[in-house]
Amino acid sequence: MTARMYGRWERPRSAGFFGLAWGVSMLGLGLVIVVMAGFMLTRSLTTALGLIVAAAAVFTPLAITVNGRTGWELALLRVQFAAARSRGEHLYRSGRFARIPGVAKLPGLLADSRLSEYETAGGRRFGMLHIRRSDHYTVVLRVIPRGKELVDQSQIDAWVEGYGQFLATQSRGGEVVAVTAVLDNVVETRLKQSGEVTRLVRPDAPEFARAVMGEAAADIGGVGVRIEARIAITYRAIGKGRVRRDEAEQARETGQRLQGVLSQLARAGLPATPLQAWEVLALVRTRYDLASQRDVEAAGAQLVRTQSWDSVGPIAHVDGWDHYLHDGARSITWEMDAAPRGAVMETVLEELLRPRADVPRKRVAIVYRLHSAAEATSLVDSDFRDAVAAEQTERGIASASARIRVGNTQAAREEQARGAGLTRFGVLVTVTDHLDGDLPGIEASVKAMSAASRLSVRRCYGSQAAAFAASLGIGLVLPEHTSISKRVTA
């Protein structure tokens, strides 16, 4: 049987002169006209030279990119980070005796978030997160991925196809902002296994049976790292006026969609259940404070008696340029710089996702930003026209690349016409360890794992705290909170 391959992804880019983007080309043409007009009006070489220098200072940082960012983007990022640092915004101190009210509110972009719990018509309880700044509502689902051992390749292909159909279905209505799939590697405490064994074993069971169950629970855990998988679905607020501001009404609409979402995921080999409010509290608390993991897992559903959404954040954090310090731990987040080149198999990310004892706390979040059906039709047509224009203007190796892009965009048009969805996607990789951990060694391991997965990653400079929060998979979609205009980005 021939292995199925996946790919044909293209980064949207308008075609301009000499391989530049259309907007940059038009800016360059406008600057040339300004220089010529200035010289014609003044007849002064000094004035013309000054205009040329000024035009070059404006144009060059836009034309040259470093690690996927323009010069202007890098400069603005540095300026904004320096300004925030001078105002002390990179530091956070909370607690009962801090100037910030509350015990330990979440910092940064999650500061105005709110967690509540509702129930579907079928009696299934789910926690719902509301990020007020962007007016987004998120439901987090626990997923139990089925392994590929003893599974036919045809079944794996069917699961992959089912997941693609799930994403396409979510995009049709336009209400879904993003779907975030997270695979989290955490240190195994074995408390959950012990609790489950305690629940299953009857008090009157034979002594030998109880001993066997206890030993079985103690042996589960392998290398000391367990995998937790979840999918977060982020919705826009629906309706107008009072309905749009009514959280209960938004929860009702979300609950109605949940059953369909769970059915679609089950067909993709991903049986899922919504996380209740206490489970979301436990998730966020243990990621910011590593030392709380055993206490949180031991508390279980009783966690709501001692914790609230205003107490699960860090007591202190420092948002550094290239790392993030929070409650005795240090985290580093990388973002996808480029998708895997060429066609790949469904196992392309296996090396990056596999749990490893030397990187016990690793989180990989794949963020799918969905286009509605109307947007998808317009975008695939626009991408195809831009690809054809680029093929007609470029020569040599660039022309060969442009020819491939034409084929990819043409295939995207055909697939979209047959009902496929159009999705932007990105990857965030977060590694957390104690302050005395070997982070240089961990960074080398992450780079090696990414390279083995044919994924190009770069560190999230100047946005480590925000990237850490986004990789949690609780509804924070970073492109909705950008502080730099798209006019100066790549």
Image (cartoon, rainbow, N blue to C red):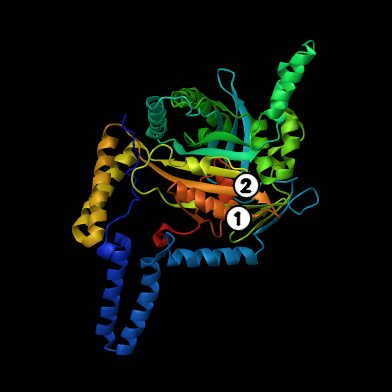
Circle on res. 287:
none
Classify residue 127 by image quadrant: top right
Residue 73 coordinates in the image, percent (x, y)? 46, 63
Residue 455, above or below 27: above
Where does label 2 land, which residue?
358
Q: Position of residue 332 (x, y in %)?
A: 59, 53
Q: In percent of the image, x 72 and y 30: which residue is there?
A: 191
Whether label 1 touches label 2, CB < 8 Å: yes
Give the CA distance from mark 1 to mark 2.
9 Å
Instruction: Inspect the image, locate mark 2, and give the three-letter code of the amino acid beneath it.
Output: Asp
The disc labelled 1 sits on which kind of residue?
Gly
User: Can you say whether 22 is above or below 451 in the image?
Assistant: below
Residue drawn where x is 73% and y is 26% of the image? 194
Q: Please name the residue shown 54% across and 36% down the image.
A: 138
Q: Earlier in the sequence, mark 1 or mark 2?
A: 2
Disc 1: which residue:
441
